[in-house]
């Protein structure tokens, strides 16, 4: 890695430049790795420009966690435990997969699952309810696809897209 101030070659793990004395920051290390095409997917995800993706994917997962908790609470209140526990476990699993896997497939499953549940409730009750899960699914699709599009662009070109920095 080279010092961003003076261009001196730095030893691995150096905290200061021996030539100019500049402190080597974690951003400098990431920039250097990015220029060499050496960023991992996890490091790429932590770039400053990826903050919107991180926050929105996490928000979608939180909506799924909240929905799982509300499903369990409703099951306890309405005495419909078995079906609701399975539903809550599925929502929890999808939330974890979305948050930690950043999976596009999971986002699509969330949308389909939410639309299916919303349609089933509409057919049974005649009212539209449960719109939060399909909304979270659509939102998750937008941001997981954005993340993977930028990651693919970085892998192909070896340069971090401006949108990610």
Image (spheres, grey):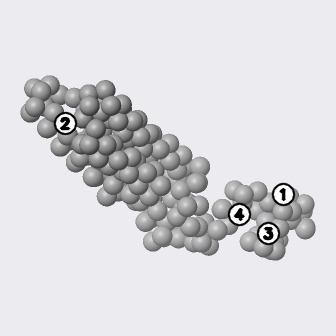
Question: Where is residue 63 drawn, in percent x and y?
Answer: 39, 37
Going from the N terminus, do you reach mark 2 or mark 1 first? 1
Which of discs 4 and 2 lies nearer the camera? The answer is 2
Secondary element at image label 1: loop
Please tell me which of labels 1 and 4 falls first in the chain. 1
Q: Determine whether the residue tagged by mark 2 lies in a helix, strand or loop.
A: helix
Give how far across and how far down residue 82 sits, in percent: 26, 43
Which mark lies nearer to you, 1 or 3?
Answer: 3
Which residue is at the front of the view, 3 or 46? 46
Viewer can see residue 3: yes
**Residue 137, how many percent across, how many down?**
31, 44
Q: Quadrant of residue 130?
A: top left
Q: Which mark is residue 66?
A: none
Q: Which residue is mark 3?
A: 13
**Disc with the residue nearer the chain's start (2 vs 3):** 3
Residue on which the image places disc 4:
29
Q: Nearer the viewer, mark 2 or mark 3?
A: 2
Residue on which disc 1 sits: 23
Q: Which residue, given by chain and number where applicable, does mark 2 sit on?
A: 118
């Amino acid at each position: 890695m080279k010092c961003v101030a003076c261009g001196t070659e730095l030893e691995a793990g150096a905290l200061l430049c021996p030539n100019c004395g500049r402190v080597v920051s974690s951003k400098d290390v990431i920039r250097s790795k990015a220029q060499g095409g050496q960023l991992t997917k996890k490091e790429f995800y932590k770039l400053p420009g990826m903050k919107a993706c991180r926050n929105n994917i996490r928000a979608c997962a939180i909506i799924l966690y909240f929905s799982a908790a509300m499903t369990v609470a409703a099951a306890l209140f309405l005495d419909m435990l078995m079906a609701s526990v399975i539903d809550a476990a599925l929502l929890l699993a999808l939330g974890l997969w979305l948050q930690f896997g950043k999976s596009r497939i999971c986002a699509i499953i969330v949308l389909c699952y939410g639309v299916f549940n919303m349609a089933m409730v509409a057919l049974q009750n005649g009212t539209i309810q449960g719109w939060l899960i399909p909304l979270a699914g659509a939102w998750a699709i937008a941001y997981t696809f954005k993340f993977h599009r930028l990651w693919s662009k970085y892998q192909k070109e070896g340069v971090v897209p401006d949108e990610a920095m």
